[in-house]
Image: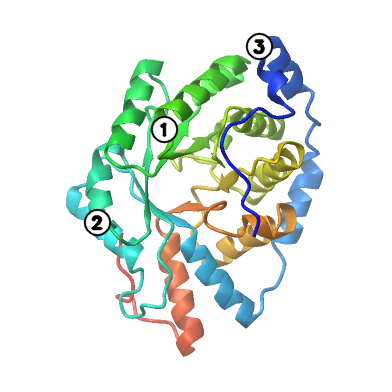
């Protein structure tokens, strides 16, 4: 598997961010999205059948890609510790079950999560930049990021200023991403959340994808999971096309994270097919593709046990998050 750098670097597209006008010209010069064609291709790929052996592999791969998430005002240290334990041993009765990729929490819970997954290889991700609305001054957003990183976050999930983006103030969004990337330092990877359900059009999702990558995102992410429209096969397909094309032009590989609304094994496998058929095998790894989810893991574990034993477990087989 090739592992291109994700470090922001001078590349063939460097001059497009020289000014607001050049950035606007580039983003509005991207090809328009064929809505019918995009949705038809996403639907077609979702009908691919997966045989038993391949399904077992896909389930384990999907488990390894989950960012097990709790982002509620009622989160407690005990809940976060329990989540960390589940990330490390998703099925305590079967130690062959892969660990999840990460646990994702608010910045004030990072230290607790870090302790809970210590020594396991599970990453700790933290939302920041006034998640989920992103409505705060840049100084507040950067302080949020620094708090998370200082507490030990391996990854930071930021939200873009959708108001600025929709108003066409692309350079403001670009500069904020660059500043957040700098605040992450060398120790934390940056996921940039677009909240695709609020961007209104596929053209805007394509523009946001390129804007995030130009600014140094290590991942581009669909959603916060806090609005009515989150990850869909079509918007994820569009973002996968963007990271594929970005690497073709720059040599820089960027990950993709659909989040929100992915609840079943069947859904997860559809997304893995999208990855394989659109971006390619290089993205079929949790370094480059993640699921932002909470309830998804339970269904993956139930389906994994069904393949192993031929029957579904009782309702107490998995924990209720």
Q: Which residue appears at 67% of the width and 62% of the height?
A: 273
Q: Which residue appears at 42% of the width and 40% of the height?
A: 188
> Which quarter of the picture shows residue 185?
top left
Under tag 3, what secondary structure? helix
Q: Image height check: is 305 above or below 201?
A: below
Residue 28, position in %: x, y?
A: 75, 22
- Looking at the rendered structure, which numbered label has been put on residue 170? none
Residue 161 visible in the snapshot: no
Under tag 1, what secondary structure? helix
- Looking at the rendered structure, which numbered label has been put on residue 116? 2
Q: Earlier in the sequence, mark 2 or mark 3?
A: 3
Residue 117, position in %: x, y?
A: 29, 57
Residue 204, position in %: x, y?
A: 67, 29
* Residue indicated by mark 3: 20
**Real-space CA distance between mark 1 and mark 3, rounded to the nearest whole angstrom:** 24 Å
Quadrant housing the C terminus: bottom left
- Looking at the rendered structure, which numbered label has been put on residue 184? 1
């Amino acid at each position: 598997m090739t592992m291109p750098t994700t470090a922001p670097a001078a590349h063939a597209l460097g001059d497009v961010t020289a000014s607001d006008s050049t950035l606007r010209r580039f983003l509005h010069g991207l090809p328009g999205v064929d809505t019918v064609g995009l949705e038809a291709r996403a639907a077609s790929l979702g009908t691919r059948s997966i045989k038993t052996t391949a399904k077992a592999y896909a389930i384990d791969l999907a488990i390894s890609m989950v960012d097990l998430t709790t982002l509620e005002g009622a989160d407690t240290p005990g809940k976060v510790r329990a989540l960390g334990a589940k990330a490390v041993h998703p099925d305590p009765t079967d130690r062959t079950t892969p660990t999840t990729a990460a646990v994702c929490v608010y910045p004030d819970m990072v230290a607790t999560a870090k302790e809970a997954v210590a020594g396991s290889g599970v990453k700790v991700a933290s939302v920041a930049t006034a998640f989920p609305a992103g409505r705060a001054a840049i100084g507040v957003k950067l302080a949020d990021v620094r708090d998370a990183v200082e507490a030990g976050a391996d990854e930071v999930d930021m939200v873009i200023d959708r108001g600025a983006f929709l108003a066409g103030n692309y350079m403001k969004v670009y500069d904020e991403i660059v500043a957040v990337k700098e605040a992450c330092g060398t120790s934390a990877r940056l996921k940039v959340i677009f909240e695709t359900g609020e961007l209104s059009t596929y053209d805007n999702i394509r523009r946001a994808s390129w804007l995030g990558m130009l600014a140094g995102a290590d991942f581009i992410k669909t959603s916060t999971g806090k609005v009515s429209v989150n990850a869909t096969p079509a918007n994820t397909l569009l973002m996968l096309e963007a990271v594929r094309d970005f690497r073709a032009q720059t040599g820089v590989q960027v990950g993709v994270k659909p989040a929100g609304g992915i609840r079943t094994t069947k859904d997860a496998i559809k997304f893995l097919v999208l990855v394989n058929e659109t971006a390619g095998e290089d993205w079929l790894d949790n370094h480059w593709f993640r699921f932002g989810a909470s309830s998804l893991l339970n269904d993956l574990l139930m389906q994994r046990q069904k393949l192993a034993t031929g029957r579904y477990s009782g309702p107490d087989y998995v924990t209720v998050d």
